[in-house]
Amino acid sequence: TPHAPTHLHCPTPPSPHAMAPSAMALLATLAARAAAAGELDLPNWMGQLAPIVGNATLLDLSLPGAHDAMTYDLSTTLSDGYEGMGSVTSRILHTLTPLVAGHFIRRQGQTQGINVKDMLDGGIRFIDFRIMYSKAPDHVFGHKDWYCLHGCQTRSHAAEYLREIRTWLDLHPKEVVVMWASRHGNTSATGTRQYPATTPAQRQAFFQEVQNTFGGLLFNSSQGRLNETSLQELWRRNERLVWFASDFEESTQASTLALDARSIDNRLTNCGWHLNALPILRNGTQELAASRARDEFLLMSMAPGGDEAYIAWSAKIRFVPSLVKSHNKLRKACARHFEIPGMEHWCPPALMDISLLSNFYSQRVLEAAFSEGSDNSLIDFPNAIYIDGIDHGGLIRTGTAKINPLGETDDNRAAEDHATDGYAYVATLVAANVRRLCRHGPSQPACAELSAAAAAARAQHPLAVWEDS
């Protein structure tokens, strides 16, 4: 049968918000040495492209992104205000989930297994940052604060992850990160439709925390629109954090230090074995140019779709005793739901299992688009792709073993063949950026050097497919 996967955490460095000139010079020297050695320097790949950037803007690049990026640190407590639940139901479940089914619900929310520093080190430059105002995990009483979420809320405040990102940016002086803050990936919902049971003052207080954390690093649109501000100018002004805000007008009071998330053109491809994203990429150059002209950020999700029927089957298998082989029937029904030829008896027990299954097919889409784009300039990637299952070194996990499954073992899948297989996700998008910039700019030696470095990085983790027995 086709691939059916069932599915690490670094200490935070000191948090200086400014670096000594000698340290900055050392980092620049190390990046230059990596480039000279013909290696792709993933933690500093944007700076490595400096010789070929010219007048390109951020909207001329394609950024590797992480979907539901903070889910590597989920608690077992359902967040207040979770999507589709009223405030009373949400409050009750917030209290009960740590005691009843909290671990199961967390398994249905975790899409990532490595922390944000490791993602950034691996070249991720777009962060899907889901937030909600909620009581602390495992607390019935006490004041609320902003946490990240996907079903369950994170163990740490959202502000703690922001500080980690700020520290990382200070250590990488030419890297630009784009973040999108929302509750559930909705660009247009406003007010309490976006953040239930919150006041404008509470939402504005969070954005003030964003400003306090990033300060002058925030892109300031009063100096010009994103589509007319070159990457060189962003570096000169040291504005290297672009903050897209859902509920822009109330949450940020229409601040020039944030961009309205309604200017994100978010394409939901419901990726999987159907390869739905490929038609968009085959018209990518035209789509990218049209979005850039409108000063819009073209974003494409390659995460699995939001169909939650599998959760019902998984819950029954997990919690309902098996009578007369009822679990076998449930597994077959669940497997049929995914419509993957040859997948007949496997029901994914966790969301990350589905994420890795989707990645197995998404690598084919990414590789096909990149390969076809070498001869066809109409084929290209959007401003960012965001995806589940980001692994160390800029990979997406396509193997069968989940990445740091929270609070559980991985059913001994780590010993299987192909358990930790991965595809060179970041290197592929960097290679696409190099090709695009060199295709439209003057020929120069740096193009050949950077193309070779990206090709070497891709060759270390190429497309790899197989069939389970």
Image (cartoon, helix red, strand yellow):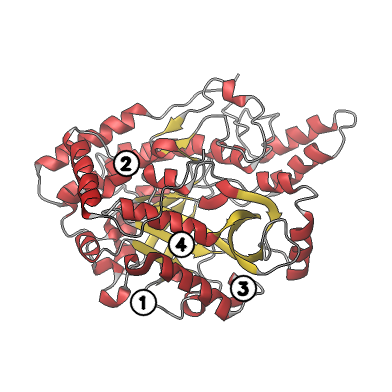
Q: Which mark sits nearer the N-terminus, 2 or 4?
A: 2
Q: Secondary structure at mark 2?
A: helix
State the separation of the CA atoms marked 2 and 4. 22 Å
Pick the quarter of the image with the C terminus: top right
Find disc 2 in the rendering and name its residue.
Answer: 42
**Which residue is painted at 16% across and 42% down in the image?**
447
Find disc 1 in the rendering and name its residue.
Answer: 256
> As shown in the figure, which amino acid type bears the numbered disc 3?
Arg
Q: Which mark is residue 193?
A: 3
The answer to whether 192 is drawn above or below residue 348 in the figure is below
In the picture, measured across the screen, residue 447 lies left or right of residue 276, that is: left
Find disc 4 in the rendering and name its residue.
Answer: 180
How many marks on residues? 4
> As shown in the figure, which amino acid type bears the numbered disc 4?
Trp
Q: In front: 218, or 327?
A: 218
Q: Which mark is residue 66?
A: none
**Where is residue 270 shown, x and y percent of the image?**
54, 49
